[in-house]
Image (tube, rainbow, N blue to C red):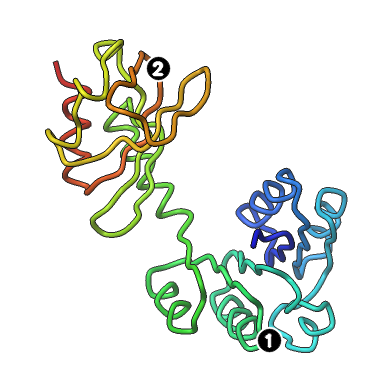
Amino acid sequence: MKMKQFAVIGLGRFGSSLAKELVSQGLEVLGIDRDEETVDEMADVLTHAIVADSTEEETLRSIGIRNFDCAIVAIGDDIQASIMTAILLKDLGVRMVVAKALTELHGKVLERLGVDRVIYPERDMGIRVAHQLVNPNLLDYIELSKEYTIVELSVPGKLNGVTLKELDPRAKYGCSVVAINKKSGVIIAPAATDVINERDVMVIIGTNKQIESFEDELVGS
């Protein structure tokens, strides 16, 4: 079932950006923050925005937090408040709890508490930028696990007009092209006869080593 109602707790840079994006996708978003000025700034952007202390159980009960499909703990710099909020959200029966971690240790604590998804915005963005700097063809990078990665790679001019059969990433490198994003639209699960053109975007999945070998081929001679 698609999630429709979100509560974003902590409206700093990360929380406000996330909340705005959810609203732009047509979803209902309740923003919660201790700072009245911050809430006032977001009041006209979000579905609802309230001044509240998320570490107080009765406060969360009174706003009906358990009725939301997902609650996101985006508290910026107070690890204690983040952990206390996560505990209360789980105890109150929120269906899905997502929390921002400031450090690896903070993330481990959140995982132990049963948080459904722990995110590391600063760390993950640093990893993405590093990969993009090393390989200019790399548009996006998502680590699925310690071994597997999914990336978006821009097709260089030297591969213009090549079919996937000729490229044969599966046999040569072990990774798979699962989609091709063209100007005319996206091809999901492309066939061996599909042709790639310069500036198309290939979505590729494989192990880190497999994709690294494939990237080297793309930027090599």
Nearer-the-camera pick, 143 or 99 = 143
Q: How crowded is mark 2: few (under 14 residues within 10 Å), some or many (20 or more)?
A: some
Q: How many labels does the image show?
A: 2
Q: Which residue is drawn at 43% across and 83% down?
A: 112
Residue 48: give its label: none
Q: Which amino acid does label 1 sit on?
A: Leu
Residue type at mark 2: give it: Arg
- Tell me the residue at 26%/59% (across/down): 146
Element carrying mark 2: loop
Q: Give the residue displayed 27% in from the left and 18% down from the top.
A: 163
Q: In which quarter of the image is the N terminus?
A: bottom right
Q: Quadrant of the rendered structure where residue 75 is?
A: bottom right
Q: Is residue 27 left or right of residue 106?
A: right
Residue 199, label in figure: 2
Looking at the image, residue 51 sits to the left or right of residue 88; the answer is right
Q: In which quarter of the image is the C terminus?
A: top left
Lower sequence index among marks 1 and 2:
1
Among the 4 quarters of the image, the one containing residue 153: top left
Dot 1: element: loop
Residues tagged 1 and 2 counted as in contact (Cβ below 8 A): no
Q: Determine the residue positioned at 27% across, 26% down.
A: 192
Dot 1 alpha-carbon crowd within 10 angstroms: few under 14, some 14 to 19, many 20 or more: some
Residue 118 position in % (x across, y down): 48, 67
Residue 21 shown left or right of residue 124 in the figure: right
Residue 20 pos. (x, y %): 71, 48
Relative image position of residue 218 (x, y in whole percent)? 22, 24
Q: How far apart are marks 1 and 2 (CA)?
A: 49 Å
In the image, residue 202 above or below residue 114 = above
Q: Can you identify the residue that label 1 sits on? A: 92
